[in-house]
Image (cartoon, grey):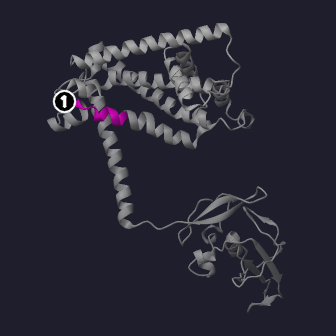
Amino acid sequence: DAELTNPQPVSRRMEDTCIETQLNADDKSVRVDDIDDLRGLILDSDSVDSDDLSYDTDGAGQNKKRSIFHISRPSTPNFDRYPSNTLDEVNPFASLRKDDEEDASIGSEGDFGAKLLPQADGRGDFGNVFEPTQGRNVLLAGLETFKYLYSIALLVFCVTLVMAGIFTKQSTAVNYNIPPVGAFFLFWFLICWLAMMEGGQGCLVGLQPIEKSKYAESHPKTLKSTSVTQKGNNMERFILGRQFLVVLVMFLINTCGSAIKDADPLGLPKSINSIFLTNGVAMMITAIVIGQLTSQVNAALCMLDFVNNYFMLLTTYVSLAIEYSGLLHCVYLVQIGFAAVTGTPVESKESPRGIIDNIFFWGRVLMSTTILCFALAVTIKALLTEQSGMYEGVPAAVSII
């Protein structure tokens, strides 16, 4: 029993739950006496009806209004998800009656292992539906926690080892006469730039189908970047230039942080130094986790916010400038050849190139192909004469393969 001093029609919108008045009789109808309990029960319902009954009188002589609500199951029944129809077990709002804000229950978990999630109906309104969550096994939960903890510990250890190598002058930065402080700041600047490039590409690609007018005022810097990359074939050009920029930045990061031969900045056992310093595991984990994976995961969830800065806009222009230089134009030659083999035409969002543009384009393709062939010749020569960074004892033929 709940005192309803000002009864409202059942079809009114109660916060984030829209109740329908059409009754579809069902043997699973449940009587509730509390409006909060009603909200919990209708989440899986297509229809609900109410019958206002006569007033009851309690021992103190107070009149209270009682209503019976008949909740019918939808076309896909969901009542079987619940352990019983006891109101205290079914009602997910029981703990939120005191402070029932509109978003308070979104994504919360009930006592019976279900998540309350927003879902749009056919009219575009958002209601709440239950998604059951399977309880995790204790051993699996413990294993998951262990993986988080040891991953964090490993990352901290690797970063500490790399920084110790820089400040004890046992990194390759000394070969380029870069002081430890300069190498430190250059290293972290490049890591941040790498993170911006890795996450930014996913954002710009993912925002292509989104109308710019929807974020023009809220994210003006994002608009500048998307306006540039979505013009003509600029997205393809941006991806091409950005990839070269990633490789260049990774090379510079290794220049600052890679350990020299026989480095031992922390006095650790030789086997530990061999794994993490000589073989570069510490640098790999530092660069990949901080500079790549973390930014990609966050950018996937916050595309508009991640690129809403001038740093990303600068990265966009630098990437386009690298592509414009023609250094990588041999890629287009491979693209044209692959399209010819597969019989798939190369689609363009721009008008056909004129004579001058064609000369400029194919001239850069020729230059890029020449540079690639020269670089490949130098690399193969270094492998054949054992003047590369390949491990000692590895045959030249294996190195080339």
x, y (%) of residue 324? 56, 15
**Residue 356's image quarter?**
top right
Location of residue 73 with respect to 213 vertically, above or below: below
Q: Say which residue appears at 82% left-offset and 69% top-offset.
A: 11
SS for tag 1?
loop
Q: Say which residue appears at 66% left-offset and 8% top-offset.
A: 355
Which residue is nearer to you in this view: 206 or 83? 206
Magenta segment boundaries in residue numbering: 278-286
Q: Say which residue appears at 49% left-offset and 18% top-offset.
A: 330
Residue holding disc 1:
264
Circle 1 crowding by C-alpha within 10 Å: few under 14, some 14–19, many from 20:
many
Which residue is nearer to you in this view: 71 or 12? 71
**Residue 87's image quarter?**
bottom right
Indicate yes or no whether the magenta region holds residue 213: no
Location of residue 288 with respect to 258 vertically, above or below: below
Kindly tell me whether residue 387 is visible in this rendering: no
Give the side of residue 338 with respect to residue 61, left or right: left
Give the side of residue 148 with respect to residue 66, left or right: left
Which residue is nearer to you in this view: 189 or 23? 23
Query: Which amino acid is tagged 1?
Result: Asp
Indicate yes or no whether the magenta region holds residue 284: yes
Location of residue 44 with respect to 371 vertically, above or below: below
x, y (%) of residue 334? 50, 23
Kindly tell me whether residue 97 is visible in this rendering: yes
Location of the N terminus by quadrant is bottom right
What secondary structure characterizes most of the magenta part? helix
Q: Say which residue appears at 64% left-offset and 69% top-offset.
A: 93
Count of residue discs: 1
x, y (%) of residue 66? 78, 84
Location of the C terminus by quadrant is top left
x, y (%) of residue 318? 54, 19
